[in-house]
Amino acid sequence: MKASQFFIATLKEAPADAEVVSHQLMMRAGMIKRLGAGIYNYMPMGLRVIRKVEAILREEMVRAGAVELLMPVVQPAELWQETGRFEKMGPELMRVKDRHERDFIIQPTSEEVVTDIARQELRSYKQLPKNFFHIQTKFRDERRPRFGVMRGREFTMKDAYSFDRDAEAAGRSYEQMFAAYLKIFDRLGLQYRAVAADTGAIGGDRSHEFQVIAETGEDAIVYCPTSDYAANIELAEALPLGPERAAPAEALAQVATPSTSSCADVAALLGLPIERTVKSLVLASDTLDETGHPVKTQLWLLLVRGDHELNEVKAGKVELPDGSGLKAGFRFATAAEIEAAFGSKPGSLGPVGVKGVKVVADRTVARMSDFVCGANVPEAHLRGVNWGRDLPEPDAVADLRNVVAGDPSPDGKGVLAIQRGIEVGHVFYLGTKYSKAMNATFLDETGKPRLFEMGCYGIGVTRILGAAIEQNHDGRGIVWPASIAPFQVAVCPIGYDRSEAVKAAADALHAELLAAGVDAILDDRGERPGAMFADWELIGVPQRVVLSDRGLKEGQVELQGRREAAATSCPVAEAAAQLR
Ligand code: ATP
Ligand code: MG
Ligand code: MG
Ligand code: MG
């Protein structure tokens, strides 16, 4: 490939809305171009990376026994009505109508369609196990698309779906996918952790997320450094990245469902002097409609412990008196009332502070009622808690969600540490959830119809680009893992347009690299050396080879790895071999 034929569009500055380094660098390197919120053009340089990621996924999926098909982006609503997801899924599901006013959806994932295929095509136990996968465009109308391709609305996912005759066989399919994912993320050159994830309504212990370790991750994971215990704390939506990146009001406004988080994070979020003694606290916000009328109260249960051991509290004990003169559905409680309700000593609540936010129609921050209350202060308030309605009973809140670093690991093999992660993959045992809803059966040996046991396995193709950059960059730009770099080698002649010798040597080396199967690009743009080197460093190509008149006189070229501080000389005849 010659640079003059390709498309290179680097920028000095990243746009102001690019909050994280991967987004900034992808924009600056000309890999993506914004079309709308969470919707991007994948420009030629970025698309090369996407294709390399896809090639690795395809290879490993096929190696693990999966078979590729391609299911449509636009899917009839009927299938989604069969499983109830058309109604249940909420605004993340993009619904569209055709010219006949028939309902369709733009797929966020493909369980319904693949189950429909299976119930028609997989008729006998002899056809099982079967694992179908595709790499396809997804659309999710995310509440807050951000970080470029890491949380887009339109994005590319590799999703696979396994069909098995029974739970035991489905377990084997799950293990196979799990193993394939380890290979995939190793090959992608990422530093990651497989963590236990929430199985939600399905239950069981078969759900794992593959989390790329990065400070900017939206998930928080706990792990035990002295054992293989690791789990997602499920903070993803509840916590912002910290005060320097998101204002608290904005951050809290992102939270649409009750959720819990560790006190350290909350303390950091609120900028409050909460020490290790107070583990968590209660936060609440009210959702208002456009007229300011409260629609619902949203609450976060953040249990408090330490001196006060308030995490012992049972929901039933919290019976706070109705506040008079307040809008329907809201109640305030004073510190004394809360202490009484929690059975704590008067005055013991300590320096707990709470901020509330008001959210209009679940999306826009209208105003922040900034009622920080040191709960010891008379007349300080917590928003009314309606247990059971607004919030699960405290007992139902998983213990994990209240962990702090240093807590004992559930496996008893050490203490827990906390890290942030980016979810790049997810494997999930579905059981018969979809096959039952859609009556998808096959005939077993005795000729009896049985429901498929299913699993689903996703990888965020485009999100991987962002995650890889979060882990691999420096002051000059991206440092791609070699396996997914847009090009492996940049051939950089100095004076390509002026010097016959340089041109001839560069053309020959480029041809030799291509013949050897090295994905090399020849920079024939005639740029000045400084600008040319800066481009390739920004783009993150792993190897650079520089040819100049001066070097060639001695028969030498200069090689420099993207992570190396200086170039080394190499005889021109040996360069291709060295770069292979
Ligand atoms: P998240 O918790 O980040 O919202 P998810 O749990 O909703 O992700 P899954 O339904 O498990 O996502 O989808 C499988 C994979 O698709 C995820 O592990 C992630 O890598 C990717 N993915 C999900 N949502 C997005 C998005 N908005 N933009 C880019 N990739 C995404
Ligand atoms: Mg999601
Ligand atoms: Mg998730
Ligand atoms: Mg997931």
Image: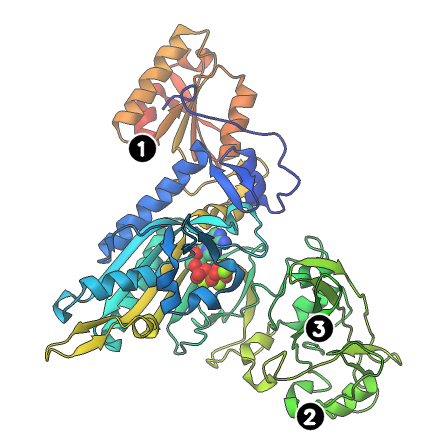
The residue where tag 1 is placed is 580
Q: In terms of sequence position, does the residue under pointer 2 or pointer 3 come before the other?
A: 3
Q: Is residue 141 visible?
A: yes
Mark 1 lies on a secondary structure that is loop
The answer to which quarter of the image holds residue 342 is bottom right
Crowding near pointer 1: few (<14 within 10 Å), some, many (20+)? few
Q: Tag 1: residue type?
A: Arg
Residue behind mark 2 = 317
Q: Is residue 189 left or right of residue 160?
A: right
The location of residue 80, given as percent across then percent down, is 38, 64
x, y percentage for residue 556? Answer: 39, 18
Image spot of residue 151 (x, y percent): 52, 52
Residue 284's disc number: 3
Residue beneath the point at 28% across and 22% down: 512
Q: Nearer the viewer, residue 476 or 378?
A: 378
Disc 2 residue type?
A: Lys
